[in-house]
Image: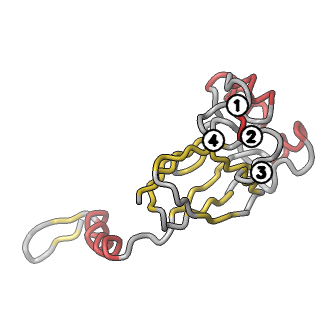
């Protein structure tokens, strides 16, 4: 705790919040960032799926991942973060893959299955949503580990995005005029 002459005591967090708040209020974040996150274990994923399926990581073993999808209908470490983003029609939105697997960031009319039948079956996601199917959707952005892309959304409203590989990975982007 910090004590000031007036006798008020503030925690470090309170002090930082007061110091930083005016800067954010005066200079809003210039773009929104959505992270594609996973925790694949490269040894077990590459053995099960194939070489290069997961790069340079240790984390959740493949058998645990499968069991999570089967019992929880998701693998909690595989997600878009944050899952809800609010922006304006002029805000750049960046999507970054900070995981070890390839992900897609695909706008969908409603959430549903992706293009990996086994994950759809294990997780009970239902049939593949049309936006994940053939022919390839130009808005179906594939992101390899370490890749990013930036876009703006001109249409106000709420836009839903999912990963067509891991269909429990959802994001909702609300665009204001």
In what element is the residue under mark 4?
strand
Decide if residue 60 is on the left or right side of residue 8: right
To which residue does mark 2 refer?
Answer: 132
Mark 3 or mark 1: whose residue is earlier in sequence: 3
* Residue occupying image coordinates x 51% and y 63%: 32
Q: CA distance from mark 2 to mark 3?
A: 15 Å
Viewer-side residue, 5 vs 90: 90
Is 175 placed left or right of 112 in the picture?
A: left
**Looking at the rendering, in which quadrant would you find the C terminus?**
bottom left
Q: Residue at x 92, y 48 (%)?
A: 51
Give whichever of discs 1 and 4 has the lower sequence position. Answer: 4
The residue shown at (63%, 41%) is: 108
Residue 128: x and y in percent read 73, 31
Q: Which mark is nearer the camera, 2 or 1?
A: 2
Residue at x-position 65% and y-position 60%: 96
Which comes before the other along the chain, label 3 or label 4?
3
**Residue picked out by circle 1:** 113
Foreground label between 3 and 4: 4
For the residues bearing labels 2 and 1, Cβ distance under 8 angstroms: yes
> Viewer-nearest of labels 2 and 3?
2
The quarter of the picture where residue 88 lies is bottom left
In the structure shown, which secondary structural element does the residue marked by tag 3 occupy?
loop
For the residues labelled 4 and 2, the Cα–Cα distance comes to: 8 Å
Q: Is residue 94 above or below residue 36?
A: below
Q: Quadrant of residue 151?
A: bottom right
Residue 30, compared with residue 54, is above or below; it is: below
Q: CA distance from mark 3 to mark 4?
A: 18 Å
Q: Horizontal and vertical percent for residue 97?
A: 68, 57
The tag on residue 108 is: 4
Q: Nearer the viewer, mark 3 or mark 1?
A: 1
For label 2, the crowd category at 10 Å Cα-Cα, with few meaning under 14, some 14 to 19 and many 20 or more, is many
């Amino acid at each position: 705790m910090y004590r000031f002459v007036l006798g008020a005591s503030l925690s470090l967090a309170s002090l930082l919040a007061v110091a930083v708040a005016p800067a954010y209020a005066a200079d809003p974040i210039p773009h929104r960032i959505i992270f594609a996150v996973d925790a694949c274990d490269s040894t077990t994923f590459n053995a099960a799926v194939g070489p290069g399926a997961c790069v340079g990581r240790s984390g959740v073993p493949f058998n645990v991942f499968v069991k999570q999808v089967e019992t929880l209908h998701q693998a909690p470490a595989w997600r878009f973060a944050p899952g809800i983003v609010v922006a304006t029609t002029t805000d750049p939105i960046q999507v970054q893959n900070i995981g070890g697997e390839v992900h897609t960031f695909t706008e969908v009319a409603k959430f549903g299955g992706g293009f990996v039948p086994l994950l759809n079956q294990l997780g009970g996601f239902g049939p593949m949503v049309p936006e994940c199917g053939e022919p390839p959707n130009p808005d179906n952005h594939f992101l390899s580990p370490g890749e990013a892309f930036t876009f703006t959304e001109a249409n106000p409203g709420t836009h839903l995005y999912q990963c067509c590989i891991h269909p429990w990975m959802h994001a909702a982007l609300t665009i204001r005029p």
